Amino acid sequence: MYTADTAAHHDHAHGAPRGIMRWLTSTNHKDIGTLYLWFSLFMFFFAGALAMLIRAELFQPGLQLFQPAVFNQLTTMHGLIMIFGAIMPSLVGFANWQVPLMIGASDMAFPRLNNWSFWLLPAAGLLLIATFFVPGGAIAGGWTMYPPLYIQGGVAYDMSILAIHILGISSIMGAINIIVTILNLRAPGMTLMKMPLFVWTWLITAFLLVAVMPVLACAITMLLTDRHFGTHFFDAAGGGDAVMFQHLFWFFGHPEVYIMILPAFGIVSTIIPTFARKPLFGYVSMVYAVASIAFLSFIVWAHHMFTTGMPVGGQLFFMYTTMLIAIPTGVKVFNWVATLWRGSITFETPMLFALAFVFLFTIGGFSGLVLSLVPVDIQLQDTYYVVAHFHYVLFSGSAMAIMGGIYYWLPKWTGHMYDETLGKIHFWLTAIAFNITFFPMHFLGLAGMPRRIPDYALQFADFNMISSLGGFLLGASQLLFLYTVIKCVRGGAPAGNKPWDGADTLEWTQTSPPPYHSFVTPPQIKLVRGRSHANAR
Amino acid sequence: MQTHAEHDVYYVPPPSIWPLVGSVALLVLASGFVMLLHKIAAGPYVMALGIGILLVMLFGWFSTVIRESLAGKYSDQVDTSFRWGMVWFIFSEVLFFAGFFGALFYARILAVPWLADAQMLWPGFTAAWPTAGPGVKTVLTPVDAWGLPALNTLILLSSGATVTWAHWGLQKGRQFQLKLGLALTIILGALFISLQIHEYGEAAFTIRDGIYGATFYMLTGFHGFHVMLGAAMLTVIFLRALAGHFTPGRHFAFEAVAWYWHFVDVIWLMLFVFVYWL
Amino acid sequence: MSNRSCQRIGQIPGAIQAIPILIVWFVSARAHAEYGLNLHAPATNLAQKIYDLHTAILWICLAIFIVVFIPMCIALLRHRKSKGHRPARFHDNLTLEIAWTIVPVLILLAMAGTATRLVVAMKDTDEADLTIKVTGHQWKWEYEYLGDDIRFISTSSTPKEQIDGAQAKGENYLLEVDRPLVVPAGQKVRLVLTSADVIHTWWVPAFGLKQDAVPGFIRDSWFKADKPGTFRGQCAELCGVGHGFMPVVVEVVTVEQFDAWKQAQKALVAAAAASAGKTYTLAELKALGEKVYKTNCIACHQATGLGIPGAFPALIGSKIVSGDKSGHIDMVLNGKPGTAMAAFGKQLSDVEIAAVVTYERNSWSNKMSDVAQPADIAARRK
Ligand code: HEA
Ligand code: HEA
Ligand code: CUA
Ligand SMILES: [Cu+2]
């Protein structure tokens, strides 16, 4: 990817090593970012393939392809791998590539540690995927791993616990690295309130990671000791409580969903101003909104547990706090709209993804709001309505923002333009197929179809069939994505330093692809409030 | 605000094999542990291999860091990075313990009273603490807080003082005070651990005895593990102090370990209050 | 399908996306008993209120959606570069920002008020006319009418052949049970729920009642059905292999019918007690045992008796099954703590356990040709 003409900055001790060792031993944020992105793409396809199998089984009522035991494994592993294998690593990949470039740093604060954070992922991934091949098959208790069901399982359950421990170590170290990079390595002149919004969202996301991953580690450690060492944390006979696990899990789990959406907000907040050719509206309120979302995320966790039978005071508290999140999130949506207003808009592929994000994420946010109302949630908890909700926020939210971000920065990363026509086709196929797949799930949920079932009553048949057809189309469209990305990596029209005339963050002052060591000496920055105009002329 | 001139080039280390070795180590270790849990004969050996690789990695990695440090590659800015890094690492550790304390409070304040209310299922069960739970038939005699635990509190608190004393020595360039302080700290740490092991041996209940046993051993066990880690790190620092690695101006490694040690101290105080005493 | 469900589509945000769905829906020739786009038709006052709350929220969300996206669409249509629109430079407007923070707060307050009253009403389980203890088992429900000596287990009655596609699927496919819960109309029924193994969730949509059954704890909830009828639901919490096959069926009857039903149940109990001392033949036990096996054991140990390697052991050639009879009986009576194998002694009668043990010992390639009698079981119960 790095050609000879990028060697301008060779005043530094070492350039890019050649061959496989370049990737195995890298201390370069760009290389590591690339590794993260490829890894997550692979995992996305793996977990997506599992989703295809799920949709194939659910195509018709009755058991056709998989026995229930296997079906539950597919569901569980699909969710787990999508979250821990696809979305999170790809966002860290973005952070690796973009954070140093956007703040004018030479690299991440701890380049070696950075490499370890990455290489732990394949180790954990291996452990996780290997569970499909052990006696008893992979874990089948849902990605939420609720005991006592989780206590009943076989070898795979222990392997998964340890895999998640390793993922947790990776996330915590990765997050510390990002925080320190942002706090300590900004170019002179770049005050906190002048950082690009993407950097802000990652700063706060990294904080969330450091705060909640240890709690997950603690919860699954208790699972392990309950399984093997005779503890009774989740067993009433010994004075424990299975619901306690849910509290611990969701104390991690809810911030976790914002870990997956905040950087996506950051990506969208970068793309929209670029293609509206207008500064981001309400930068300061955007920063405060992200911070408030992060703060609130710590005190809403039990909205996943409204049917566990908690006391009425608990239900009300968690309902109110959850509803509050609509306020800062609304501020963000309004700001995006106001950014578009009276801009000079063009519709390149990244922009299409960002616009679809605003539109579809809001639908997902609204279904979240519907779920936050305890009485309604009682009807909808553990139904396909929830599945619809979280695919709207996760697929058309996180995943589509990621895709948009990839199109947006591919020219910078590779030095080539991607194929705009293919990109647009990919976008429209994805957006349409996505809605065909997941919109009917709202109806299924309302009508009473529980989630995590391999077979369903007859009145759910038609919507499931539609949803499966949509799902297959959605899967096939992603093959086009893969093709477009590979095509762009291998060649294409030269991108130039700054292919997007509306872009104004620091990375566009660098060559495309940027030199192996960018910003070896920090750039001087002259800034307008809220806009990081680079002044590296 | 730093000006351009103050910013020297931030040190970016050359490619390194150690992270990869570390990943392999953890993979091997985890696989071995799973085997052990499922009584596969190779388990302990695979685990030992994993630990071996991990130790090699730690040794290799830290030697590199020490070499770089001595070579003066770490500018003030790098030093600040290390400080931030350590702070956030300790923050994550705090939350790890918070999770277990959360479990303790939840069980004690909520779950056990609820179980006592569910007379339909557990006739005759009352919400007393400590308890092994309604289905476990052991009479629990908790450890007396004002026996060994109080002594251990004293020991750990004094070790906090000795490490601070060593730090003063280091800052004032009194190398002997530094070494003596460190040695005392390590000895006190070791004493703490041996007393803790003794206490485990004497305790009239096990980790299997319901929620009290579970929270007790989990919290004190993880704390003890952290003390051991801290002591190991102190030992490395001690050896480095003997080798004369630290100067009054530049001794981040020492401070990091000292912070860690204080963190372990504070956790113990929480343990003493909520696990042993109240 | 009701008119109401047709209208509802209009209320769903992003109705445009529903167009392809609608086409397929109208083209599809199948007749549907209760084809749903919306929540079930409520059968209790509370469910009605939930229904109305949901409808109201949907309208509000739709309204906000329109208010937010009309400006966005205008911008997308008019403020394009291709139309020569030049970008404005503004990037702040305090009044606007305060307005769009305050207005949502007010909207949310209104929503929260209604919801709060409903939550409090749903939690009020006092002064019930009837209390029923519901225990979740992997994968069936046990009902116990507290104060009346009635206790039975309710299991899915959908035949395996229908699930595997060997037989046409019935109207209530997967939503039918052998013995429904029977309750009187117009009376406040309090449920106390718990579980014997993992977490299950008892759910009847028409009652607006969904409550987790947590092992070792008691949770309670209530409903008051207005009119007689049959209401169907499912277990809603993932509880293992049989989670999709754990329906809930409630038969709401008039108070008179309910009293008559209670009498009949008591007679059944008496008859069962009488048969407990009886001695059965191998053939009788095998026949009954096959039924018991199909409803209780098949999900794990499979119809073939081969189990699922690594998760559930095979019963063919099993040491326990081909060993001493008493060991086998103990395993079924007491289960094996810490594994999925439950203690069936609490769920099944002596006759049933005798039957299933005999069945397992004399089926597939197992040929023990010995018989376990109800008396043997009684003897091994502690
Ligand atoms: C990226 C991930 C993501 C995001 C961003 C969200 C966002 C939200 N979620 Fe979601 N959620 C998940 C991922 C996510 N969720 C997942 C994975 C699950 C299921 C887990 C499992 O069980 O497996 C879940 C489940 C879930 C539940 C539990 C459902 C159940 O199991 O019973 C609830 C209940 O309250 C909920 C609520 C919300 C709310 C209120 C928001 C809010 O943040 C949304 C806020 C946004 C808006 C409201 C739209 C924009 C706002 C405006 C335009 C302003 C004006 C609006 C008003 C005034 C109304 N979510
Ligand atoms: C970020 C997260 C994310 C993403 C992107 C997705 C993407 C998809 N999800 Fe996922 N899903 C979850 C997170 C996610 N999901 C979670 C957390 C759960 C809950 C798990 C649990 O209950 O524990 C869940 C559960 C879940 C269910 C419910 C299962 C159940 O309750 O039993 C379903 C059912 O339809 C589903 C479907 C899909 C589909 C069709 C896609 C599609 O968008 C996928 C599209 C992508 C591809 C298909 C990959 C690309 C293509 C190929 C691999 C080539 C081969 C394919 C063809 C040739 C067609 N998901
Ligand atoms: Cu019982 Cu699901
Ligand atoms: Cu949540």
Image (cartoon, grey):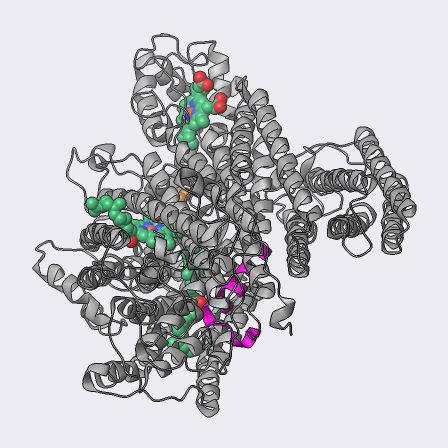
Residue interval drawn in magenta: A188-211
Q: Is residue B248 magenta?
A: no
Does residue B1 appear anywhere in the picture?
Answer: yes
From the viewer's side, name the closer residue of A488 and B49: A488
x and y, in percent, of residue C125 in the image: 52, 61
What is the tally of numbered marks visible in this picture? 0
Does residue C259 appear anywhere in the picture?
Answer: no
Position of B233 compared to C15: left or right? right
x and y, in percent, of residue C178 in the image: 31, 39
x and y, in percent, of residue A292 in the image: 54, 72
From the viewer's side, name the closer residue of A228 and A281: A281
From the viewer's side, name the closer residue of A52 and C45: A52
Q: Residue A56: which quarter of the image? A: top left
Q: Quadrant of the N terminus of chain B?
A: bottom right
Position of A380 compared to C196: left or right? left
Q: Give the main secondary structure of the magenta stretch.
A: helix
Q: Residue at x 32, y 65 (%)?
A: A408
